[in-house]
Amino acid sequence: WALVFTRNAKGAPALQKISRTKAGNTFANFRTPGTFENVVTFLGGRGRLSAAVTYRVDPVSCERISCDITAADLQLGWLRIPLPLRAKGGWLDFLYLDDDMRITKGNRGGVFVHIRPEKVPGYLSN
């Protein structure tokens, strides 16, 4: 999933606020059940910020997943810097979901609109 719009809340972590890039440079990769990776590329691909996340569907509401960041790092060229982790216990509410678009709201109030990566060129041309 490619991030095409975000609205950060006042309580959003500073790293989340400064890592905003142009649409299509931030991805949420769901490759295996129960985990995903958020990846932000910048500086023409020379910089990369990534966070590994474990999640589980909330037993009370299937529109919510509970999320914990388990690892995070910043990479600039060959230099890789592990980042400290904050307290666990975040969540995402799915406000809208279809085959091509996903809109979520995080526990700190941020809203995130993702589309399928192959749809990004069409989205950017409109």
Image: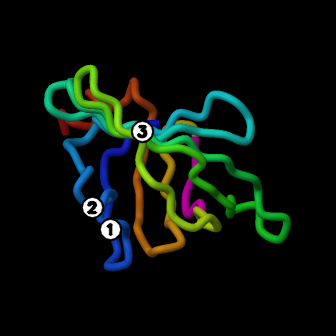
- Horizontally, is 50 left or right of 124 in the view? right
Q: Residue at x 53, y 38 (%)?
A: 37
For the residues labelled 3 and 2, the Cα–Cα distance comes to 14 Å
Check disc 3: other Cα within 10 Å, few if <14, some if 14-19, many if 20+. Answer: many
Residue range of the region highlighted in magenta in the rendering: 93-98
Check disc 2: other Cα within 10 Å, few if <14, some if 14-19, many if 20+. Answer: some
For the residues labelled 2 and 1, the Cα–Cα distance comes to 7 Å
Please give the residue where the numbered disc 2 appears in the rendered image: 17
Please give the residue where the numbered disc 1 appears in the rendered image: 8
Task: From the image, state whether disc 2 or disc 1 is nearer to you.
Answer: 2
Q: Position of residue 110 (x, y in %)?
A: 41, 68
Frontmost residue, 70 versus 91: 70
- Horizontally, is 57 left or right of 5 in the view? right
Question: How many numbered dots are placed on residues in this image?
Answer: 3
- Horizontally, is 33 left or right of 103 in the view? right
What type is the residue that disc 3 sits on? Answer: Ser
